[in-house]
Image (cartoon, rainbow, N blue to C red):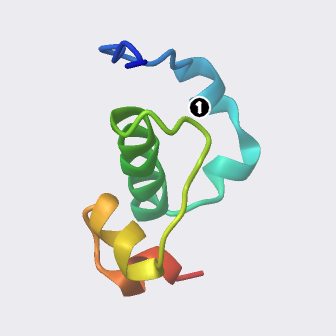
């Protein structure tokens, strides 16, 4: 049975902006995380990330070094 593809996902900007741990991340890290959230939504895999660093970097539209950077 095919699942219906939702056009959007629920996002709370206030939670994003108030998260203290997220605020300590670099802007690049926050951008990569947002791209990965969007990729999970697009692939109907909410909450699930699997793949090699190279595969995940392609999903996040960044270089592998940017993905694994601390």
- The residue that disc 1 covers is 16
Position of 18 compared to 45: left or right? right
Farthest residue toward the right?
A: 20
* Quarter of the figure that contains the C terminus: bottom right
Residue 20 to residue 49: above or below: above
In this view, the residue farthest toward the bottom is 65
Identify the residue shown where x is 51% and y is 81%: 68
Q: Quadrant of residue 12?
A: top right
Q: Is residue 45 left or right of residue 48?
A: left
Q: Residue at x 37, y 38 (%)?
A: 38
Helix, strand or loop under label 1: helix
Nearer to the camera, 56 or 67: 56
Whole-percent x and y of residue 25? 59, 60
In depth, the one of 23 and 33 nearer the eye is 33
The spot of residue 1 in percent (x, y) is: 43, 18
- Asked where in the image residue 58 lies, by quadrant, the reply is bottom left
Find residue 31 and report its horizontal and vertical position in percent. Answer: 39, 52
Residue with the most extreme front position: 1
Numbered-mark total: 1
How packed is label 1: few (under 14 Cα within 10 Å), some, or many (20 or more)?
A: few
Asked if residue 10 is positioned above or below residue 47 in the image, the reply reads above
**Figure quadrant of residue 2:** top left
Please give the name of the residue rendered at 30% of the width and 14% of the height, measured from the top-left corner. 7
* Residue 20 screen position, x and y as percent: 74, 44
């Amino acid at each position: 049975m095919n699942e219906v593809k939702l056009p959007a996902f629920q996002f709370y900007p206030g939670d994003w902006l108030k998260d203290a741990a997220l605020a300590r991340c670099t802007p690049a890290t926050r951008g990569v995380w947002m791209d990965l959230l969007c990729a999970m939504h697009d692939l109907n895999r909410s909450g699930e990330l699997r793949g090699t660093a190279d595969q995940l970097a392609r999903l996040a539209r960044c270089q592998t070094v940017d993905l694994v950077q601390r």
